[in-house]
C-alpha cells in the first residue's frame, strides 16, 4: 500500500483491482450504517465522501503510465455498485469525477494530464458543473469562456452539479464565442464561483446536486481542457460514464432486494388464503423473490459484459469498438434500470402495508431508484440498440450512452 501526501492530507494509492474492491467493501459497510438517517434528515455525507477519496477510490482509473492502477471497467462497475448498495447518493457523487478522469485520457496536452491525474492520485476530487437548467436539451450550453489577455474568464450558471460542493476542483462545461466545447477546471474556492445546495429532489437527497454560479471567474491557460480538439475521435468517455450510472442502479436494486428479504422474514404477514404461518412460506412471495433474484443476476451479468466490452475497446480503440461499448452499456442500463424500479416496488408489495410506515424510511429505496433512473431515459436505449443491430447505425456520441 502506497500513499501520496498533498495539502496535509495523506491519500492511499490503490495498486490493483482486488485492492479496489476490498477498500470499497470496507467503506460501504461504514457508509451503510447511517444512510437511512442521512436521507431522512438530508444530512450531506461530507465526511464519507472525503473518506472515499482519501482511501484512493477516486484514482483507481488513472492510467498506469501516470502512476495509477488503471483498474478494469468490470471492476470499476462492481466498485460503484458496492458503494451504491450502501448509499446511492455517495455512489453518485464521484461518478462525474471518474468520468472527468476518463475524458482526460483523450486530451492532447500531456502536461495537463500529468497535473490532474497526479492531483487525483493525491486525493483531490473533481465535481462537476456541466448541465444547465434552461436549455432546450441537456446538451445546450450557454456558459461562456472568454479570453482575456493570457488567461480566460468564465460566466454562466449550472444546475444538477452533483459532487461540486464536496470537491477540490469543479470541471465546468463551457463554450467560447465560436461554440467550441471546453472543460474548465476551477478550484472550488476560486473568486466568483458560488455553489448553492438547492437540490430538492425526492430521491438521491444527499448528493447536493444544486446550482453553480460563475461570475467573471478568472482561469489560467493550463486549466482549460480543449474538448473540441479530440471530441470527434473514438473514445470510451460516454460508455464509461454510463457504465457507472448503470452500476449505481444495480446497487440500489441489490439493497432493495436484500431489504425485502429481511422484511419478509421479520415483519411481513402471509396472505390469509395461503394457509401459511409465515410470509416466507407464502408461495407467491417465494416466486416473486425468485423472479427478482433471477433478474438481478441477469443485470449483474449484463453489467459485467458491458465492462468487458469497454476493456476490449481499450486494447483497440476505434469507431467500431466505441460503438460496441456504447451498445453493450445501453443494453446493461436497460436491465439495471428495470430491476431497480421493480425491486423497489416489490419491497412494498411483498412487505405489505407495514413497509410503508414513514418511520422505517424504506421508501428511500424507491425514491432513489426513481430519481436516479431519470438521468437518461431507457426508451432511447432501446432505440439505439435496435437501430444498431437492425440497420448498423452508429449510436450517438455523448455521455448519455
Image (spheres, grey):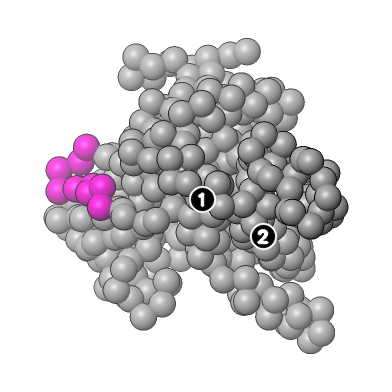
Asked which quadrant contains residue 40, the reply is top left
Rate crowding at label 1 as few (under 14), some (14 to 19) or many (20 or more) other CA atoms within 10 Å: some
In the rendered structure, the answer to whether residue 142 lies left or right of residue 58 reads left
Please say whether residue 182 is visible from this viewpoint. Answer: yes
Q: Residue at x 34, y 46 (%)?
A: 208
Residue 103 is inside the magenta segment: no
Asked which quadrant contains residue 148, the reply is bottom left
Compared with 136, 42 (above or below) is above
Q: Give the secondary structure at mark 2.
A: helix
Which stretch appears magenta? 189-198
Of marks 2 and 1, which one's residue comes earlier in the chain? 2
Closer to the eye: label 2 or 1: 1
Q: Residue at x 72, y 30 (%)?
A: 17
Compared with 162, 34 (above or below) is above
Q: Give the secondary structure at mark 1.
A: helix
Rate crowding at label 2 as few (under 14), some (14 to 19) or many (20 or more) other CA atoms within 10 Å: some
Amino acid at each position: 500500500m502506497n500513499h501520496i501526501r498533498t495539502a496535509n492530507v495523506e491519500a492511499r494509492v490503490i495498486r490493483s483491482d482486488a485492492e479496489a474492491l476490498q477498500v470499497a467493501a470496507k467503506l460501504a459497510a461504514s457508509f451503510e450504517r447511517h444512510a437511512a438517517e442521512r436521507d431522512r434528515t438530508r444530512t450531506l455525507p461530507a465526511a464519507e465522501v472525503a473518506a472515499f477519496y482519501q482511501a484512493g477510490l477516486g484514482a483507481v482509473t488513472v492510467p498506469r503510465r501516470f502512476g495509477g492502477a488503471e483498474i478494469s471497467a468490470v471492476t470499476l462497475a462492481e466498485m460503484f455498485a458496492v458503494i451504491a448498495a450502501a448509499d446511492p447518493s455517495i455512489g453518485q457523487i464521484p461518478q462525474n469525477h471518474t468520468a472527468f478522469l476518463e475524458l482526460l485520457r483523450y486530451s492532447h496536452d500531456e502536461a495537463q494530464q500529468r497535473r490532474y491525474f497526479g492531483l487525483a492520485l493525491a486525493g483531490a476530487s473533481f465535481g462537476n458543473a456541466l448541465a444547465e437548467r434552461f436549455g432546450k436539451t441537456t446538451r445546450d450550453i450557454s456558459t461562456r469562456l472568454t479570453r482575456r489577455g493570457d488567461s480566460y474568464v468564465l460566466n454562466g450558471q449550472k444546475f444538477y452539479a452533483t459532487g461540486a460542493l464536496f470537491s477540490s476542483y469543479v470541471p465546468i462545461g463551457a463554450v467560447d464565442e465560436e461554440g467550441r466545447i471546453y472543460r474548465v477546471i476551477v478550484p472550488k474556492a476560486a473568486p466568483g464561483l458560488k455553489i448553492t445546495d438547492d437540490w430538492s429532489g425526492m430521491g438521491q437527497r444527499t448528493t447536493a446536486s444544486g446550482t453553480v454560479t460563475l461570475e467573471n471567474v478568472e482561469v489560467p491557460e493550463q486549466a482549460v481542457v480543449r474538448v473540441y480538439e479530440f471530441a470527434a475521435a473514438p473514445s470510451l468517455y460516454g460508455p464509461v460514464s454510463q457504465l457507472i450510472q448503470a452500476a449505481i442502479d444495480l446497487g440500489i436494486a441489490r439493497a432493495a432486494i436484500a431489504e425485502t428479504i429481511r422484511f419478509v422474514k421479520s415483519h411481513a404477514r402471509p396472505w390469509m388464503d395461503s394457509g401459511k404461518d409465515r410470509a416466507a412460506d407464502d408461495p407467491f412471495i417465494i416466486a416473486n423473490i425468485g423472479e427478482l433474484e433471477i433478474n438481478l443476476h441477469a443485470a449483474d451479468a449484463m453489467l459485467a459484459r458491458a465492462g468487458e466490452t469497454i476493456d476490449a475497446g481499450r486494447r483497440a480503440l476505434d469507431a467500431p469498438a466505441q460503438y460496441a461499448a456504447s451498445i453493450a452499456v445501453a443494453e446493461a442500463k436497460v436491465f439495471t434500470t428495470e430491476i431497480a424500479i421493480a425491486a423497489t416496488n416489490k419491497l412494498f408489495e411483498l412487505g405489505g402495508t407495514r413497509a410503508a410506515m414513514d418511520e422505517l424510511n424504506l421508501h428511500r429505496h424507491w425514491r432513489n431508484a426513481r430519481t436516479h433512473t431519470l438521468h437518461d431515459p431507457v426508451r432511447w436505449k432501446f432505440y439505439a440498440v435496435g437501430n444498431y443491430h437492425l440497420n448498423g447505425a452508429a449510436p450517438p456520441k455523448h455521455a448519455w450512452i
